[in-house]
Image (cartoon, helix red, strand yellow):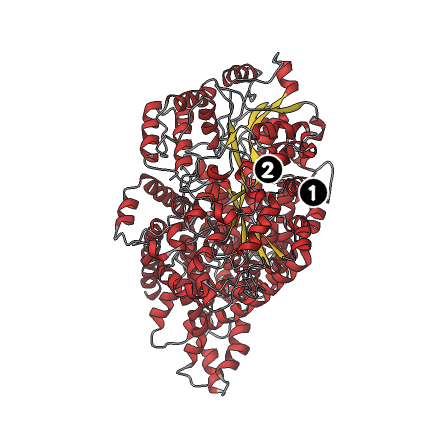
Amino acid sequence: MSSTETLARPVVTPAATPARRRRRRHPWVTGVVLSVGALATAFPFAWMIVSALKPRRESMAYPPHLLPQQLTLQYFTQLVQQLDFGRYLLNTLAVVLISMVGLLLMAMAGYGFAKFTFRGKEPIFFLVLTTMMIPVQVTMIPTYLILNGMGLTNTLVGIALPTLVSAFGVFLFRQFMTTIPTEVIEAARIDGAGEGRIFARIVLPMSRPILAVQVVLTFITGWNSFLWPLVIASDQNLYTLSVGIALLNQQVATNPSLQMAAASLMVVPVLVVFVVFQRHIVQGFALSGLK
Amino acid sequence: MANSSVRRALVPAGLAAVLALAACSSGGATTPQATSGGTGSSSAAPTGPLTVWVMGDATTKFDTLVAPFTQSTGIKVKTVAIPWDSVDQKMTTAVASGDGPDVVQVGLSKLRTYADTGALLTLDDATLAGHANLASSNFLDGVAGKATAVGGKVVSVPWIADTRVLFYRSDILSAAGISTPPATWDELRADAKKLAARGAGKYGYYIPQWDSPLPVEMTWDFGGDIIGADGKVNFDTPEFRKAVDLYTGLYADKSVPTAGDFDQTQGFVSGAAPMLVSGPYLAAAIKDAAPDLAGKWSVAQLPKGTTNTSLLAGSNMAVWAKTAHKDAALALLDYLSTPATQVKWFQLNGDLPTAKAALADSALTSDPLVSVYAAQLANAKIVPLVPNWDGATGKALLDALNSIALKGTDKETALTALFAATKGQSIG
Amino acid sequence: MRPRATPYVLVGPATLLLLAFGVLPILVAGAVSLTDLDAAGLGDVSRVRGVGLANYAELFGDAAFWQAMRNTAFYVVVGVPSVVVISLVIALLLNRSQSRFFRFLRSLYFLPAITGIVAIALVWGYLYNTQFGLVNYLLSLVGLGPVPWLSSPGLVKVSVALVAIWRGTGLNTVIFLAALQGVPKEYLEAAALDGASRLRTTWSVVLPLLRFAILFVTVTTVIAWLQFFDEAFVLTKGGPLGASTSISLFLFQQGFAGARFGYASAGSVVLFVVIAVITVLQLRGRRSDVEY
């Protein structure tokens, strides 16, 4: 990974080179450099997948085999059989869906902080930032008692609520919505567009790259949600996948192959969501011409 | 980054913030919501339904186990499995809000902490009257009755047991001219030295650097204890010093790996560390990881100093103090303590029983490994129930021994620091 | 809609949720830090006593606390610049092309960010293992090692930080990529026509336009590293002998695992204050920079 810094140099063409050559279609040198880095970065991930497919005795072999000699799906089968898989999956998807509401709330707040001046804006924004600085250890019990007071224990909403909105998300939206030209919004107002319409039709579409990032992040948070499904649920029927998988861990020794299979299984949907949405991350909006 | 994984690994007991909040929620605490479905009927005849928290992935098996109980008593049992790693979070929030289960499985290492919260019902003789199976004489001495009382009060009954025995590679030992596994710690130290001489990357024994009970077991084996007559932690004894010499001596002999991340299963299977003290879980891992090693390894009871007392770990069952179904809960505990139920649980989930009659059952004694465990269980003790063993006393103990063994800290300096750090800790 | 109310409608819901689940707990922590709340007090409020500032006094006299503080400073000083620079460089390079192949590479760089912490513990624990690990095996092939990656008190911080850098880079790369979409192509073309080199264009055109993103990533990364926990917890439990224990891990071990909530709250408040001061300083510094 550290190689990227030094290797950035070859791509820099001397100033004297004709502009045409510089804008070649295939920046292959960059491609090679990035490929090497990407392979190094992805290696532990690949190792996880491979380990999940190896019989345990092969995982223990020394010297280690890079490629599995014998493939097995037994750990995946074991996972699906031992867990109430369908139910945990449905719960997880429900939590993810509820989390997406939080996405909208964060986008609204980001827009409010980025493009409006109002009384109390600075202190309110500071409060929002403050929540990001709180060591996470401190929040659990007060949060539980609040939810308990609201009668939301043992509900899916109660599970999703504590992590519905993150200061990180609000901050991220704000930073990027700041770069939306105010002229565009003003022009729409002059044309008589309502605030709701401006937000839905102008602000959100122009924030597409960051929305895509947030969708991925929200999905990851919801998908991996562990603490609240565990603590809030007094009924095992509300457990999510990550809680179900944690049940497989033994007190002292756990089968590493099984854990690898579980981890691989958890990653696949996140990966799919990322691949789908990353296209939007880079289909940026053309700011040009508006300035 | 600033997302969920931190939150989730970070665990337990978040901050208990409570104070003010606990007060305002305590109104809700008296209505036991967790026993959902419970219509609050707590008349003289035991009724349920009962909510039971069990650890790990045991819901289906536990449901199978208690099905006959429900059939004969009409008491429904709802099982909720709690991941081992997250039990603190679940317990702490339950204690803070008052909402808990009716019956809960408590790992012995957590017993002191949960008992201190007052969340567990005191099981005095009057409470247990009429439940013959719950009499302490039925259980292993190491966990029965007063052995797991906290501050003199019994708050749990034994459920499943776990212990530590000596694992050894018979093939490697005999190749080195060692015909029988070491019967004393002195022999073990000598054998380990011999085995370590096999070459680079080979050792004779393995000490897990996170295993705080090991030096305690050694102390017991030299005839001592780490708890004084006054119930206070006391490491300043000749027996403990012998344990320290043994522990650090194994390092000094270069008989054990110094890397803290040495893997015991891999070390044993590969033969790098052909002897170690570990639990039944290691046997399961070896069978799974190296089926072809069968016949080349075995287990034996711990080596002796003057005795060979081992660790007794495992879990007890407790009743939630605020349960609305006390009688039903006790009836369930009684059922779980019958030898037949305990044997069935061993067959279902592989956990060793705590009822002496169950341990003598042929279903267990027919397995040579299990009979070694069962014999060792009869001579095993729990880690003293001081507050926060893992985080305080146990940690100080490991820090002291490992700093002598790994960093070359002067023995007396390290021990003085240990005495100071653990002063005043008590089982009372 | 009434324009005066609009901003409040926009920021209201999110702010309320954050107040309830974010701000309130730190206030509670502040209160608890002045008490001896423990497991017993949790079950029975009448057993909780006020102890004034005793928890703070004990904390500042605790050698393990200061060791954790030093370790955390190490993590921040090593980790933050590495994560910010590496993810920025990767994003700039990835942004050179929108081809299918580059999109594929982008996914590879994101993989660590979505790998579960359990898998990270297992895989890296295995790679780093002194006796049976892959890294030392490869080193042994060229006659080096074995290196005690996680067993040496000196090396362990570096090993653990490396995993956290590996894991933290992907997300920030994606954030930078999104930000790069806001850089008008015309600027780049104009600069190219002027004969500016790519490095120069990047330095004097692209980076200034990314300053919001860089500020954002830096601020959030500093906060995340000040709360460093996961990697040390799963790989070493803070060992050997506390050499890799961060402040968050210290709080967890000393306080929460042992149910000493009062003491742990005091530590949380101290950590919160440290983070708040550092964050405010960063934002102050940048603000004057932006307004020039």
Residue C181 visible to an observer of this rendering: no
Residue position marked by numbered label 1 in the rendering? A53
- Give, as a three-letter code, the residue at label 2: Ala
- CA gap, disc 2 to disc 1? 40 Å
In this rendering, is residue B16 above or below B406?
below
- Residue visible at 41% across and 45% down? C258
In this rendering, is residue C35 above or below B43?
above
What is the chain letter for disc 2? B
Residue A161 x/y as whole percent = 50, 66
Residue A68 x/y as whole percent = 70, 38
Estimate how packed mark 1 is, as few (under 14), some (14 to 19) or many (20 or more) residues with alpha carbons within 10 Å: many
Most foreground residue, B28 or C162: B28
Residue A229 x/y as whole percent = 55, 59
Seen as rendered, the residue at the extreme bottom is A192
Q: Which mark is residue B355?
A: 2
Which quarter of the figure has residue B163?
A: top right
Tally of numbered tags: 2
- Indicate the secondary structure of the residue bearing disc 2: loop
Q: Is residue C156 left or right of residue B199?
A: left
- Indicate the secondary structure of the residue bearing disc 1: helix
- Give, as a three-letter code, the residue at label 1: Leu
